[in-house]
Amino acid sequence: TIAMKQYNLIRHMFEGSSFLANVADTSKQPNGLAALQEQLLLDICRNGTHKVRNCYQGIEVIKRRAFCQKVLLVLDDVDNVKQLKALAIDRDSFVSGSRIIITRRDASLLNLLKVDEIYAAKELNRSESLELLCWHAFKEDHPKDNYLDLSDQVVAYAGGLPLALEVLGSFLYCKSIPEWKSAISKLKKIPPVDIQAKLKISFDSLSDEVKELFLDMASFFARTYGVSTIKILEGCNFFAAIGIRVLADRCLVKYRPCNELLM
């Protein structure tokens, strides 16, 4: 969330820019590294599709065609050096003035890379967490009557993590008090560190059709989704436009400029 906000604030200062989300997960899919390379080239070069035959060829194409200009590159959720090598991340690869932002859950890899600066994102405090939850659950900055104690319980289980608060709040929007209590009962069964299981509560409540749409988007398309993607999904008998709106309302996908979507 912080990385995306920073990206949107400063991208206009660069000749080319790319935000690669969920790098670790994407790289583990078939041809995942090549998909990341192609997405980076598409974002920065902006002149048609860029197919790479293999990972090694992709590295050379990126160095030659993408990194010959001042770029802003955000790599979200990187978990090993192989992913960085596949994307030609090396100090000598970039034009002066370029900025590379890498996000991950611990600092070990960043220390190995000898990065210029490490920013440790702080968890939201109770007041900030409650406000963020309320904006998604009630569309205002405070809980409705009789929901304060329930909201505090959800905040406690979210652990100050913005994404968890957004997803859980969106899931609880327009839900009754008994439905809130049921969701909290599920949260109590999840270990505090298991954030994915917390987010899965929202996913599990989707219809089978929307679940299938979400999984196909995650499996077969790289990171961003535009008009062409919706047409492909509609051709596969998905009601994609409606399903994507449901996913966006749950904060399981987010809208970007130019009507693109980000998972």
Image: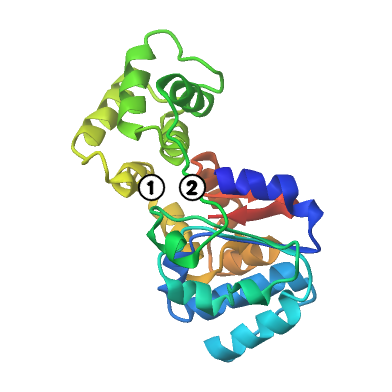
Residue at the (41%, 39%) spot, across then down: 164
Q: Is residue 72 left or right of residue 82?
A: right
Tell me the crowding category of disc 1: few under 14, some 14 to 19, or many 20 or more residues within 10 angstroms, Cα based: some
Residue 177 in percent (x, y) is at: 33, 18
| 13 horizontally vs 167: left or right | right
Mark 2–mark 1 contact, CB under 8 Å? yes
Mark 2, other Cα within 10 Å: few <14 / some 14–19 / many ≥20: many
Q: Picture coordinates of residue 208 (x, y %)?
A: 38, 54
Q: Which mark is residue 168?
A: none
In the rendered image, the vertical position of residue 181 relative to residue 161, given as above or below? above
Q: Residue furthest toward the top?
A: 145
Q: Position of residue 3 (x, y in %)?
A: 58, 48
Q: Quadrant of residue 192?
A: top left
The structure residue drawn at horizontal position 79% and vertical position 59%, both measured from the top left corner, is 14
Q: Which mark is residue 203?
A: 1
User: Residue 100: which quarter of the image?
Assistant: bottom right
- Specify the quadrant that holds the N terminus: top right
Instruction: Give amino acid for label 1.
Output: Phe
